[in-house]
Image: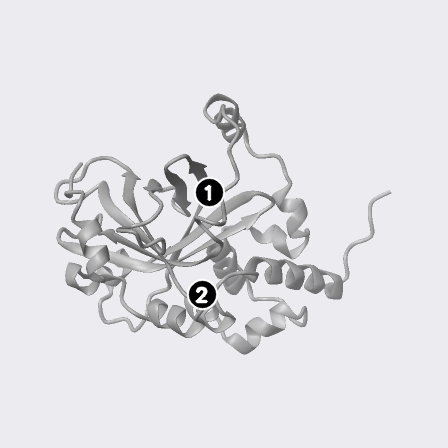
Amino acid sequence: MAPAPLSPSEIRSIFGRNLRQLCDGGPPISALCQEIGINRTQFNRYLSGEAFPRPDILARICAHFDVDARILLEPLEALRSALPDRFLIEMRDKLLIGRSRPVDPAVLPDAIYRFWRKSFMFRGKIVTNVALIRTRSEVTMFKGFDENLLAKQENPDARRFPRLAYYGLVRQHLDGVSIYCQDRQNQSNINFFEFGLEGNMRFYPGFALLLRRRIDGMNRMTAAVLERLPNDPALWRNIVRQDTVHDLEYAPPIVQRALDRIPDGL
């Protein structure tokens, strides 16, 4: 016998609960709504289970959180526990042979970070934005944001451009952590960071490697720095509102020195 169809109120309740879980531990709701381009009052109605989003709004929400429209009907826990595709199973069995050790929160605590690196696209420029590191059930996840530079080039007079979210997993090593990231276009990068910069444990120096073909005038490997930010939502919002591309002198001197350690290349 087929299960009874869900009522509209039940669907709204499932969606609201899923959306609250997706927002948990992330940036403030006001900043999140600005990133996605959604009215905050309406977004609060989604969170409380009072309303459904329009199809175009749902598409924005799904794209931002890297989920699909099943969040309307199925609990997020069930979606996350589904078996991965065959490629991921083979990667797990063939590449990730050694058991991954949990990330030590004493050296890389769950927090909002600022990501600094030299630009892959523009020689002589740096890129900076906020990133979230969060641990669930001994799995440490990374969520970062990039400015939509291509859209900005195509329409320089537009007032705002939604940030492009990308997601990753963090693995701990004896001498640092590696972060494996991918965005919605399946563009991947690998990062490695050491513990502490010039004796300051709030900064993590390392490098970022973008997995793509060589393009003249652009980089695939740059120096990078993670900076752990204080628990100050006003500071986080201020960073999110700023442009992401700057001259090197925009960064603090300690970050400038770290970014100059690795020459642009590849």
**Eyeballing the image, is 224 above or below 34?**
above
Q: Can residue 148 be seen in the rendering of this structure?
A: no
- Residue that sits furthest to the top in the current view: 94
Identity of the residue drawn at 51% across and 35% down: 101
Q: What label does residue 177 carry, if any? A: none
Identify the element where label 1 is drawn. Answer: strand
| Residue 48 figure quarter | bottom right
Left or right of 96: which side holds 240?
left
Please give the residue where the numbered disc 1 appears in the rendered image.
Answer: 169
**Amino acid at dot 2:** Ile
Identify the element where label 2 is drawn. Answer: helix
Identity of the residue drawn at 25% across and 62% down: 152
What x and y, as percent, mark residue 37?
44, 69
Quadrant of the drawing holding the C terminus: top left
Quadrant of the drawing holding the N terminus: top right
Identity of the residue drawn at 14% across and 51% down: 123
Disc 1 packing (10 Å; few <14; some 14–19; many ≥20): some
Q: What label does residue 36 carry, if any? A: 2
Between marks 1 and 2, how big is the CA–CA gap?
23 Å
Q: Can residue 186 be seen in the rendering of this structure?
A: yes
**Eyeballing the image, is 95 above or below 261?**
above
Report how many numbered discs are placed on residues in the image.
2
- First of labels 1, 2 by sequence position: 2
What x and y, as percent, mark residue 89?
54, 28
What x and y, as percent, mark residue 255?
23, 56
**Amino acid at dot 1:** Leu
What x and y, as percent, mark residue 167?
44, 48
User: 197 or 163, which lies in front?
Assistant: 197
User: 91 or 175, which lies in front?
Assistant: 175
